Image (cartoon, helix red, strand yellow):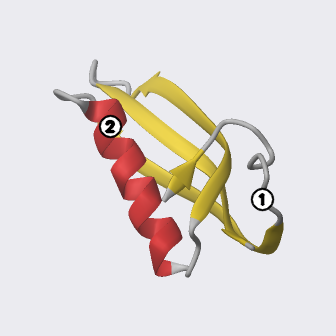
Amino acid sequence: MIVTTTETVPDRTISTTHGVVRGYTELATNSRERAEKRMEAEAKSMGADAIVGVRFMTGNDGDGASEVLAYGTAVSLQ
């Protein structure tokens, strides 16, 4: 799975856009990596082989626990 923060993949053409994918987890050891893995799993379930425009956000749930959200657009490449 190719995961990039850019809107394109160098030397590749996006043939299908599957839609936005997200990965979410409460803050714990390696939470960013876990959020990314969940996002990748969702993209794979849609038939994608890449995620473009990836962003990460952190927040607080109000009870003092932090959370990480990873999101991007699932696509298929030629």
Q: Amino acid at mark 2?
A: Glu
Which residue carries the number 2 mark? 33
Outermost residue toward the front in this view? 11
Which residue is at a point 46% across and 79% down the rendered structure image? 45
Q: In x, y percent, where is residue 48?
A: 59, 73
Which residue carries the number 1 mark? 12
Gap between marks 1 and 2, in whole Å?
A: 25 Å
Q: Amino acid at mark 1?
A: Arg
- Answer left or right for 78 relative to 65: right
Residue 35 drawn above or below residue 11: above
Q: Secondary structure at mark 2?
A: helix
Q: In x, y percent, where is residue 1?
A: 48, 59
What is the quadrant of the C terminus in the image?
bottom right
Q: Quadrant of residue 35?
A: top left
User: Local crowd at mark 2 within 10 Å, few (<14), some, or many (≥20)?
Assistant: some
Which residue is at a point 32% across and 37% down the rendered structure image? 33
Which residue is at a point 39% across and 66% down the rendered structure image? 41
Residue 76 drawn above or below residue 8: below
Q: In x, y percent, where is residue 50?
A: 60, 60
What is the number of the mark on residue 75? Answer: none
Which residue is at a point 67% across and 36% down the rendered structure image? 5
Q: Nearer the viewer, residue 70 or 61?
A: 70
Q: Nearer the viewer, residue 21 or 76?
A: 76
Q: In x, y percent, where is residue 4?
A: 62, 41
User: Local crowd at mark 1 within 10 Å, few (<14), some, or many (≥20)?
Assistant: few
